[in-house]
Image (cartoon, helix red, strand yellow):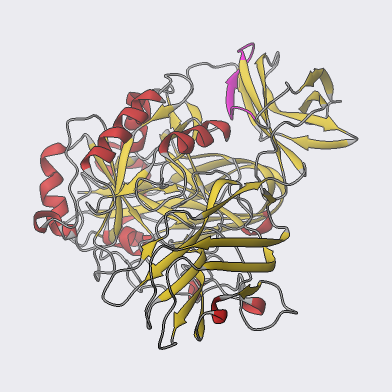
Amino acid sequence: MEKVRNLTNIFISFSLNQRLPRNSSLTLRIRGGRNNKNDWYYLQPYDPNLNGFIKTNLANYTPVLPILITGKDLLIKYLIIGERGIDANQIFAFDIYETLVQSIVEDNKNIEIIIETPNNNPAIFHQNATINILHQEKDHFTVICPSTVNIKENIDVLVRVEDKFYNLVKDFLGKIEVFELEDQKKPRSIGIYEFDKDNEGILKINNHKFETPGIKYLEIEHNASRFRSNPIMCRTDSTHKRLYWGYIHGHTNKSDGVRDPKDYYTNLLNAGLDFGTSTEHDHIWETKDEDFNEIRHIVDEFLQVGHFVTFFGYEWGYWYTPGYGDICIYHRDDSIPILRSDTNKYNSTKKLIKNLQSYKPKVLMIGHHTALRPGYRDWSHFDNTLEKLTEIYSTWGNQEYSYRAGNPLPPRYKFFGYGKYAKKRGPVLEKKGSFVQDALLRGHKLGFTAGGDDHFGIYPSGALDPDNGIYPSGIMAVWAEELTRESLWNSLTNRHCYGTTGPRAVIEFSIDDYFMGDIINLKDNLKLVNERIIKFKVISPVDLQKIELIRNNSVFKEKIINSEKIEISYQDNENFGEVALSHIDTNEKFVFYYIRIFLKNNNMAWSSPIWIISD
């Protein structure tokens, strides 16, 4: 057993009951392959004075050539170059010194031994070494509350004990005191709570009530340190929609993730999320029909109406084909088949859209990393009746606009490395014409989500995603009537949602009586021809730095802020006809608005747009 992010020594020995002839190889792999993803570092055969030095006895049997591979993989391949090869039943030893353990807790993490002989495909040795990767000591608490509540309503509060890499700290023992906070008021203690023995690093506080309306927080105190929850809007009007948080793009070991699906969904629950979905790749060689059938059962098993909502989804991707993109597809019920990109009938975006037509409105397409050059999206193949949302942010960065225009989180590709290059950011790899703003400019009506493309089955993932890209996982919020599949689906199809890079900021955005995601027909609202009152409210758990009101992809208004909340309105009195854009495929004229938010620690958030159209 090893703790995350410690330097450790690993000693492996084994024997093979087969001969290894010349030009065979033995590979020791710490990272790489479909289900062996991590951020482990330091493996090298050259210098015993440097971290990750590996010592082996292979040269005792025959001359070998070590080949070090770093990048997406972390491995050393020992190529057998001696004429005699190595006889069967020899004892092989690999001793690794001062290697840096990954930052993610993982049970039975594989250190793989791969054997390759001439004229045979590589095969993983069935007696691979495994290690249990444990959390470090407690670093902080995360307090998660509902973002919207009514006065005198019972709510549940989740307290997570985490190490500095956001892993849950199991079997934590101790007491915490919980306080209720409101602006300009003295904190009020609501009780002392103790973690149960054999806990999973989680404490649940049930049936708390707020007696008065306002912006509330809960704060816990432990050993003179205090940790505050996300902001809570406590209201008197129970007719308002509620705000729910979800994570709908991640992978399990049914495709190229690490955890099994049940662990994946358990981790979403343990993160205090309201809804979630896994999205395995559609390829038949990755996720078979029986795997998807099993996932459907698990999705239904984890559904808890009013507490945690699940949907079935998958990721369609004819990878690296120019313009097709990667698209997550979500099903409203079980009546819709899976359209696999490795089937000729569905192997292009155009074909996919054509064959999904008969299933609307029970299917949703959400494009992923649309502007990342490998796997970018050509927006000319598009159907707004199927595709109403786009993933504006994930571990691949912000797909909204170009870094040349000021995007601080531009699309980048993954990069791993050794030594001084470890964790170095990969290059900006963006595709002109494939940003979210390019789609909006064409007239596409797309609301915004944010997600992950996580392969560890965890949320949150800390300051960096240890697998794809270099950014942390995002999170999405939905304004809905209630926490049910029907209500969430209705809100998603009407774009009443938004995304952030992680902070649970409460965002309200409206024009007159219309809300984010709405499409306003000018003929029914003639006063909007010359006057549009744009309002927004943001309440954030971290400081707001700047808010930009975007009109037709340009900054219409900008507000510099140094606080955690703002409520403001602007008036746009420019004539609709003078500022309207033309839809690329129809006679429609349109104007759209949304807000782009910059928060502390390089975080961002985006409301979905509101459109005003004239047919």
Residue 180 screen position, x and y as percent: 77, 23
- Asked if the magenta segment contains residue 152, the reply would be yes
Residue 343 in the image: above or below residue 275:
below
**Is residue 320 shown left or right of residue 410?**
left
The residue closer to the viewer here, 459 or 615, is 459
Q: Give the quarter of the image for residue 523.
A: top left
Residue 215 in the image: above or below residue 367:
above
The residue segment tinted magenta is 144-154
The residue closer to the viewer here, 597 or 93, is 93
Q: Is residue 589 visible?
A: yes
**Is residue 343 shown left or right of residue 28?**
left
- Asked if the magenta segment contains residue 334, the reply would be no
The main secondary structure of the magenta stretch is loop
Residue at 63%, 71% (x, y): give it.
Answer: 42
**Is residue 153 shown left or right of residue 186?**
left
**Is residue 204 shown left or right of residue 288?**
right
